Image (cartoon, rainbow, N blue to C red):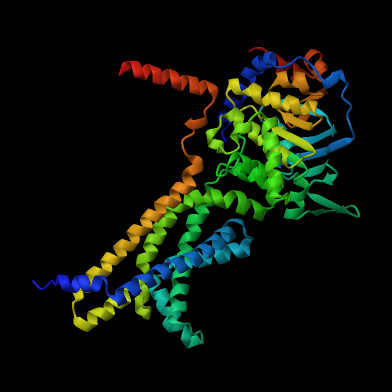
Amino acid sequence: MSTHGEMAMTETGQATAASAADTLPEPPARPNGKVKTLGEPIVTVEQVHKSFHGNHVLKGVSLTVRQSEVVVIAGRSGSGKSTLLRCIDRLETIDDGRIVACGNLMGFRETNGRRVALRDHEIARQQREMGMVFQNFNLFPHISVIDNITVAPIRIKKVPRAQAREEARALLERVGLPEKENAYPRQLSGGQQQRVAIARALAMKPQVLLFDEPTSALDPEMIAEVLDVMVDLSHQGMTMIVVTHEMGFARAAADRVLLMHEGSIVEDAPPEDFFTKPTSDHTRAFLSKILQH
Amino acid sequence: MNWSWSYFFEYLTNGLMLQGAWTTVWLSVVSMAIGLGLGIVAALMKMYGNRALRYVAEFYIWLFRGTPILIQLVIIYTGLPQIGIRLSVIEAAILGLALNEGAYLAEIIRAGIMAVDKGQDDAGRALGMTWRERMWIVILPQATRTIIPPLGNQFNGMLKTTSLASVISMEELMRNAQMLAQIEFRVLEVYIVAAVWYLVLVTIWHQIQLRIEAHYEKPFGPAAAVASEGERELAKAVRAAGATNT
């Protein structure tokens, strides 16, 4: 992809950030007014380095995410935030450091302090514990909405077909698309496709959901419908790591907001502090840029 | 002029010709099916295999695309017995046609796989699919859509290429026409009838191909049907405006 394309994407994301903030409920509206309790660490990233063809994208990133925690990662394009997310789900290999997710050392087995690379099916098993939602949805275009949701449970987890379909219908209800089960992805709007993609990820009953700029490819009027589903998920205690420019979502649902800059995490704070008293100059620069619009 | 309509019509429904046409059909289908299997394996070896597998696949494709099918058939049937490999006519014909077809299909299948968006593979991996599961569930079904039109073209070619198996005495349409021609020497009538039968087979195949294409295109049809609320309103407004103009 050209840099130009990415920049354009970022600008639309930033331009809509302010408008989305208006449509979302105000800060942590936890159900029943209860204070959210976070569980044990479920994703631990330690000193991770990653380069692409000599380009050092992640420079010793460390991060701990606890159960039920919602972490928003912001930053300019090229700052490494998507790469970090893809490394956590082992869609990219890492050059150095370690990532433990859902109790698994991602990509490796450690015996007597020695690391052995895992085989294809062992890595697949690790990846099953997490769900991922992509910027471009990546729904399977050749099968219907309900098949998109049930294909992995049926073929991978061997869930009985009738049960998988029943659960898929419940998920479609949850993302507000009960009438679309027989549609093909092409027949849906971008916002609808992304909601189906969320349902597809949820169908595998993941312990953690990763979102890679889930609203950046959407028309402005469709962003809110996707964010609503995500806020809803956060209220239900789903552990989420969300790479996004939607600062409205960060304010409404995040427990922590991170800023990445040139391959490092330069800010890590609760949303109130992130927006009102950032410690890093990069964060101040970032905030002033998105608030200009 | 020495053209006989009565011979023409006699040959058109002659049992030997009908039998030949039927042989042409099943020989094409069987060779194509085996060739498709070989093509998929060769394409996957070339794209995802280690260096050794890649070289094997490349050598196979190079060899069978680089030599005439006629020579391949003659070598397999007439030449191999010299080193102790004896195949029946039918085995030799199927083997030769399938090996040749597989080499061409490998490149078509490779192109089809490359045309599938990289994000599809990401989505499969994120759902916890192994390489094999991603191939069968996600990648190959989508590649099929790209592959079907050239594949149909290849099968069209296969229906006619089987006529070359006549040189190793495979009793298909061409060979049977030759035999009939030697009985009554109505050469023109016999071969025109053979040509007509090839045309019929190819035409029937074309109709089948259109149906298969339509089937695989269905998920990619017009998106307008279930557009967003805003787009529906817009479309309604445009239609209304159009209606007043006419």
Query: Left or right: where does residue A129 sit relative to residue A144?
Result: right
How many marks overall?
A: 0
Query: Left or right: where does residue B227 sit relative to residue A79?
Result: left
Q: Position of residue B28 (x, y in %)?
A: 42, 67
Q: Quadrant of residue A165?
A: top right
Residue A61 seen in the current view:
yes
Q: Quadrant of the C terminus of chain A?
A: top right
Vertical order, A255 against B172 (above or below): above
Residue A53 seen in the current view:
no
Vertical order, B246 against B43 (above or below): above
Query: Left or right: where does residue B107 sit relative to residue B12?
Result: right
Q: Position of residue A268 (x, y in %)?
A: 82, 24
Q: Quadrant of residue A181?
A: top right
Vertical order, B146 against B171 (above or below): above
Task: Pick whichever, B44 or A32, lies toward us.
Answer: A32
Task: Pick whichever, B199 or B18, lies toward us.
Answer: B18
Task: Pick whichever, B1 or A116, lies toward us.
Answer: B1
* Residue placed furthest toward the left: B1
Q: Quadrant of the N terminus of chain A?
A: top right
Q: Position of residue A43 (x, y in %)?
A: 83, 37
Residue occupying image coordinates x 18% and y 74%: B7
Query: Left or right: where does residue A136 sit relative to residue A244?
Result: left
Q: Position of residue A128 (x, y in %)?
A: 75, 45
Residue occupying image coordinates x 67% and y 44%: A150
Residue occupying image coordinates x 64% and y 60%: B50
